[in-house]
């Protein structure tokens, strides 16, 4: 079922802007209604906790829409900015805004860094600064700390490429594109080759390869970098 629906879903995301806009509007409406639950003095702790969990799920969903190009870069930029601008009257955002920001960046950060690294660095710096000035709980502080570590040790040194592969007569025809949609390499490989072989081939064909390479499918799924399964079988399993 997923394989049959995937081409249709991809086509909708790319071509139907009205659908994308309606989907985002629905997410925003749901987000705002959940915020009312969180902010209401009559809401119990358990109800507030459930609402916060749903809020983070919504931003995570939007993040995955960005990875499959259903949401443009400027929307993610606007969402992140809006999350921090929403404050308590003293320039400090509520703790839920920081949680949502971290959740969104955990999904899109590695891809976002390639197209807007300077903004991402500044935004995470702002998160760290705000957290230091606020009385957030330990879990939220830990989220921000982990995000800062990831951004400085991984995102800035990764090249994110989308891998597309088609089975030929015993071989795989592989092509890789960057987040801007530009093809950076194309080659043939035996279907029995392992993923490390694919990574090595991609690196050999890129003029200035990064030390760390992140490969994703056009569905947004991350390809494991150490899987010893034959590439043909691995791609077939991930695309089913």
Image (tube, rainbow, N blue to C red):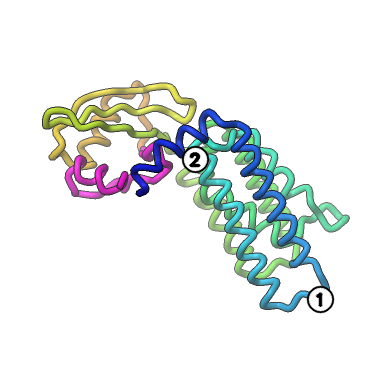
Q: Is residue 212 visible?
A: no
Mark 2, other Cα within 10 Å: few <14 / some 14–19 / many ≥20: many
Which residue position is annotated with label 2? 67
Mark 1, other Cα within 10 Å: few <14 / some 14–19 / many ≥20: few
Start and end of the magenta stretch? 213-240
Q: Secondary structure at mark 1?
A: loop
Position of residue 147 relative to residue 182, above or below, is: below
Which residue position is annotated with label 1? 42
At which x and y percent is residue 108? 53, 44
Q: Is residue 237 magenta?
A: yes
Say left or right for 68 vs 229: right
At which x and y percent is residue 239? 31, 44
Tell me which residue sits at (11%, 32%) in the image.
170
Closer to the chain start, of discs 1 and 2, is: 1
Position of residue 184 relative to residue 122, above or below, is: above
Q: Is residue 23 magenta?
A: no
Q: Which one is in front in this view, the residue at disc 1 or the one at disc 2?
A: 1
For this orientation, the residue located farthest to the right is: 89
At which x and y percent is residue 129? 71, 52
Displayed quadrant of residue 66 = top right
Q: Is residue 218 visible?
A: yes
Out of 54 and 214, give the one closest to the viewer.
54
- Count every numbered label the image shows and give the total: 2
Tell me which residue sits at (66%, 48%) in the image.
26
Q: Secondary structure at mark 2?
A: helix
Out of 229 and 219, give the one closest to the viewer.
219
């Amino acid at each position: 079922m997923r394989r049959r629906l995937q081409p249709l879903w991809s086509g909708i995301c790319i071509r139907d802007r009205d659908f994308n806009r309606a989907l985002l509007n629905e997410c925003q409406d749901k987000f705002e209604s959940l915020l009312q639950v969180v902010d209401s003095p009559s809401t119990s702790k358990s109800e507030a906790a459930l609402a916060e969990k749903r809020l983070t799920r919504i931003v995570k969903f939007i993040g995955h829409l960005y990875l499959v190009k259903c949401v443009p870069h400027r929307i993610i930029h606007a969402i992140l900015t809006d999350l921090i601008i929403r404050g308590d009257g003293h320039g400090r955002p509520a703790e839920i805004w920081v949680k949502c920001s971290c959740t969104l960046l955990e999904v899109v950060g590695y891809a976002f860094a390639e197209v807007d690294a300077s903004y991402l660095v500044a935004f995470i710096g702002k998160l760290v600064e705000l957290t230091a000035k606020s009385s957030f709980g330990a879990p939220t502080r830990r989220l921000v700390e982990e995000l800062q570590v990831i951004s400085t040790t991984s995102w800035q040194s990764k090249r994110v490429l989308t891998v597309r592969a088609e089975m030929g007569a015993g071989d795989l025809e592989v092509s890789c594109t960057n987040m801007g949609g530009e093809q950076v390499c194309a080659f043939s490989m035996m279907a029995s080759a392992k993923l490390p072989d694919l990574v090595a081939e991609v690196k050999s064909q890129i003029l200035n390869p990064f030390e760390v390479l992140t490969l994703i499918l056009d569905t947004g799924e991350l390809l494991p970098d150490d899987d010893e399964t034959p590439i043909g079988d691995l791609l077939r399993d991930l695309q089913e």
